[in-house]
């Protein structure tokens, strides 16, 4: 994956292997993810591939306490997106915790090109977002089931 910095140098730096699609992640994608992970600043982040198909960028962020319904409403019909969702879970010991889940939204009604582009860029982005261990794939609104996502995150 290449990281694009908005600094004066503007140079991309190599982080972990090339994305097979050639799309590069903007540094802000990783910086905001780290902020979410460390400071609990957002309940979700939704990423999109830029119109010129060169960059992965942040489309929107959910303020702390934003609902799962709000997250779902930001996923467009007929298109694809990546999302990071902060999911509250109950552990086997009964403790309450939160886990970050990588959500891959690839609407069944999306055309083949965006589906292929998002699929070929997904793994490299996921690897760049350090700490993501679980992924949830959704291709239809009925797949967006919060209880299923919580189970995927390890909730009992």
Image (spheres, grey):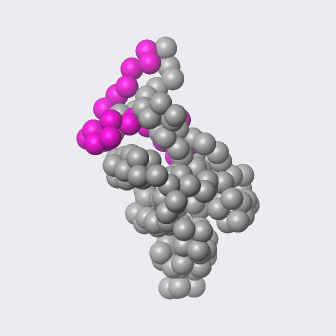
134 or 79, nearer to the observer: 79
Query: Farthest residue toward the left?
Result: 17
Q: Is residue 57 left or right of residue 60?
A: left
Q: Residue at x 59, y 79 (%)?
A: 147
49 or 41, nearer to the observer: 49
106 or 7, nearer to the observer: 106
On the image, the x and y values in percent for residue 68 come to: 67, 66
Q: Residue at x 40, y 47 (%)?
A: 113
Q: Residue at x 50, y 55 (%)?
A: 110
141 or 146, nearer to the observer: 141
Magenta-span inclusion, residue 1: no
User: Height in image: 101 above or below 32?
Assistant: below
User: Height in image: 13 above or below 36?
Assistant: above
What residue span does the magenta drawing correspond to?
9-34
Occupied quadrant, residue 143: bottom right
Residue 152 appears in the picture as rendered: yes
Magenta-span inclusion, residue 31: yes
Q: Residue at x 48, y 58 (%)?
A: 106
User: Height in image: 83 above or below 92?
Assistant: above
């Amino acid at each position: 994956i290449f990281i694009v910095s908005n600094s004066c140098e503007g140079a991309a730096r190599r982080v972990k292997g090339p994305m097979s699609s050639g799309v590069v992640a903007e540094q802000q994608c990783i910086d905001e993810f780290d902020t979410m992970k460390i400071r609990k600043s957002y309940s979700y982040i939704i990423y999109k591939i830029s119109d010129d198909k060169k960059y992965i960028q942040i489309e929107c962020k959910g303020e702390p306490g934003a609902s799962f319904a709000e997250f779902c409403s930001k996923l467009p019909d007929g298109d694809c997106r990546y999302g990071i969702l902060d999911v509250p879970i109950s552990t086997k010991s009964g403790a309450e915790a939160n886990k970050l889940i990588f959500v891959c939204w690839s609407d069944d009604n999306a055309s083949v090109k965006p589906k292929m582009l998002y699929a070929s860029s997904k793994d490299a982005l996921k690897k760049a977002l350090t700490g993501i261990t679980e992924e949830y794939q959704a291709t239809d609104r009925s797949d967006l089931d919060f209880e299923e996502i919580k189970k995927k995150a390890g909730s009992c």
